Amino acid sequence: MKNHILSGIKLTLVCIVFFAGVYTLFIWGIAQLAPNNGKGEIVTYKGKTYYSNIGQAFTAPKYFNSRPSAVNYNSAGSGGSNKGPSNPEYLAEVQKRIDTFLIQNPGISKSAVPAELVTASGSGLDPDISVQAAKVQVNRIAKIRAIEPQKLYQLIIENTQQPVLGLFGPEKINVLQLNIALDKLQS
Amino acid sequence: MMNTEIIGIIAMFAITLVAALPLGKYIAKVYSGQRTFLDPVFNPIEKLFFKSSGIDATKEMNWKQHMIALLAINVVWFVLGMAVLLCQGWLPLNPDQNPNMTPDLAFNTIISFLVNCNLQHYSGETGVSYLSQLFLMFLQFVSAGIGLAAAAVLFNALKERTTEKLGNFYNYFIKSCTRILLPISVITAVILLWNGTPMTFNGKDTMTTLQGDTVQVSTGPAAAFVAIKHVGTNGGGFFGANSAHPFENPNYVTNMTEMVAQMIIPFAMIFALGFYLNRHKLSWMIFSVMTIGFLALAVPTIVTEINGNPAIAEMGINTTQGATEGKETRFGAAASGYWSIATTVISTGSVNSMHDSAMPLSGMNQLLAMMVNCFYGGCGVGILNFYIFIILAVFISGLMVGRTPEFLGKKIEAREMKISMIIALLHPFLILVGTALSTAFPEQGASTLNNPGFHGFSEILYEYTSSAANNGSGFEGLGDNNPWWNITTGIVLLLSRFLPIIGPIAIAGILAAKKHIPESAGTLKTDTATFGLMTFAVIAIIAALSFFPALTLGPIAEYFSMK
């Protein structure tokens, strides 16, 4: 046992140098060749930079709103609500979100509201919404911004990201990208 | 649109299977010491490893010496790890100024990474420094290497000969890390980098949003970490939200990559066994049993998640996206459901959606996947767990048809059966005792729950099941960072890691030393569909008898209460 402990200590030190040190530096080195030097994808708009993958809280009615978040899109942390599907308190909250949404978006029928707009994501930082979730918000935004709804539908089509190779996964819309495009329409 | 989600899942499974076959062949070559194309790179590196630690990697060991070496090096890692986590606030590489860990949390965290579980009672953003993250990443490599090395000892012991000498532990261990885990991790990390996963040491960034709010953004050396987290079936997230976090898993391409990365070694190990022993039919028998088990859990889960939450559908809104609570839009309900079962059958425990918010029957299947714990299973240990069930099935079918129970030319006798039964029953014992204790003391159990009623009970059950399966996922609503949860799950983790490694290796070692009986007309064939069915039945019966009452109190009751 003693011999094994001793050689274990030595082997551990070499392994730490190799797997925590050399491997990490190697990947970090490769990262310097990757897009944005491995600091995460960014978009620049009006001289400001944003992480395109990190969702933002869009609560103002003039923007396409993002999904509810258990961490309020504060990306110093992350996480979901972890509410169980039958939790009465949770279901009451979802009902409240539906009611609020219908008040903010008059003329929209309840059956058009997609569940994802009234439920929180897993990370609390979901950058995307579905096409349907963007479409139900068009009337509200068109009214506030005094734009033709048709233009907004066009914007949604332009910003829809197709499944990978057209084959794998859902289609989605990056809310930040869509809202930047929206601001650009009127600037 | 649902169609592309389904095609995505099928592609993930197919790519894994296609890639696992050549990888299995490669792994068999590594463990049997044959030449491989990576020799020029790794021969000198490994020589350096052994020379500087004074290890003779050619000295053969018997099964007991293997286990002593394995336990000894784990003790070293435990002591060193405690020191790092308890002092991380004073050590370098801590740009976010995170404080030292409390002793009970450090105890839980180190054990959990030591045993390849990665149950995390902290959040990566606030709980650990970058130095600690790198140390935990080191443990992700070596703990997976330990599991693989143990499986290599099993492979060696299953050869048809009579011997006590079963190769060298350090040789198997280092080669698993350098020749198997490292190359796949590098490939995975590079794919992640090009899709937006960060690899930086700069610490938190501050960003003003388009709407004008100021938020902080946690980053870090995530790409290197997330790669081995999956390749080693570890599952511990760099960030709190694990692979639901848009930095850990930025898009559907990374989602597919991480899914393949975590399943490929468990798949490949099954085929490696076939190549190593030249028994391909046996491999396919094992793979078929495991795959049937996996699909039996995955398909209903995917369907349930696609159908959505009936309680929300009742409110009259559009639920065509499925159950969306706790899920990311970029993955969708189908890929989230698939991931939740993949990560629980193998022992990864990384999540791309929050299991606590999954539908009751999905939660039940996630639990069942960990309760069985041998449909594919974790790096190396999956095969060890399955081996126990093979021994049980050989014995039972031997009795049924009146033949002496033999497996690969070795007679199975009372001692081996006793060990198998102890190991098979240890798993339900640890889960149920832990759950019962936490339920019995509401100030420890019930007071920490995030949900009332049946679902709350499921949170307790899930935590111990995940610990005993060395899985690491959680019903994360549970307020688990306190001495009760940290210490009890820590103990469960230790027992459920090392005993299920020692047990099968002991059996294999004892059998290897026995006289080899050549195959004859009277031998029970173990590479047939009939025997596969028998093994499946043994697994299903043990799981059903042990866990049905507990599942009835949790997810099944919740399911019926929602109707």
Image (tube, coloured by chain):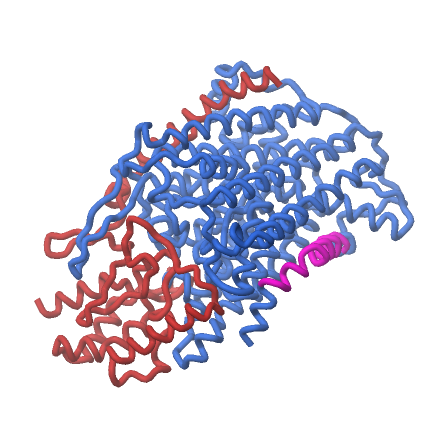
Chain colours: A red, B blue
> Which picture quadrant has residue B87?
top left
Task: Specify the principal SS of the magenta part.
Answer: helix
Q: Is residue B46 left or right of residue B317?
A: right
In the picture, which quadrant includes the C terminus of chain B?
Answer: bottom right
- Is A22 located above or below residue A155 in the figure? above
Q: Residue at image x 22%, y 65%? A: A178
| Nearer to us in this view, B266 or A79 | A79
Q: Residue at image x 64%, y 59%? A: B550
> Which picture quadrant has residue B354?
bottom left
In the picture, which quadrant includes the N terminus of chain B?
Answer: bottom left
Q: Is residue A70 visible?
A: yes
Q: Give the percent coordinates (x, y) of residue A147.
A: 14, 78
Q: Is residue B343 visible?
A: no
Q: Is residue B535 left or right of residue B485?
A: right
Q: Give the percent coordinates (x, y) of residue B262.
A: 50, 47
Q: Magenta residues, as a range?
A: B534-554
Q: Give the percent coordinates (x, y) of residue B161.
A: 78, 29
Q: Give the percent coordinates (x, y) of residue B187.
A: 42, 41
- Is B393 located above or below residue B71 in the figure? below
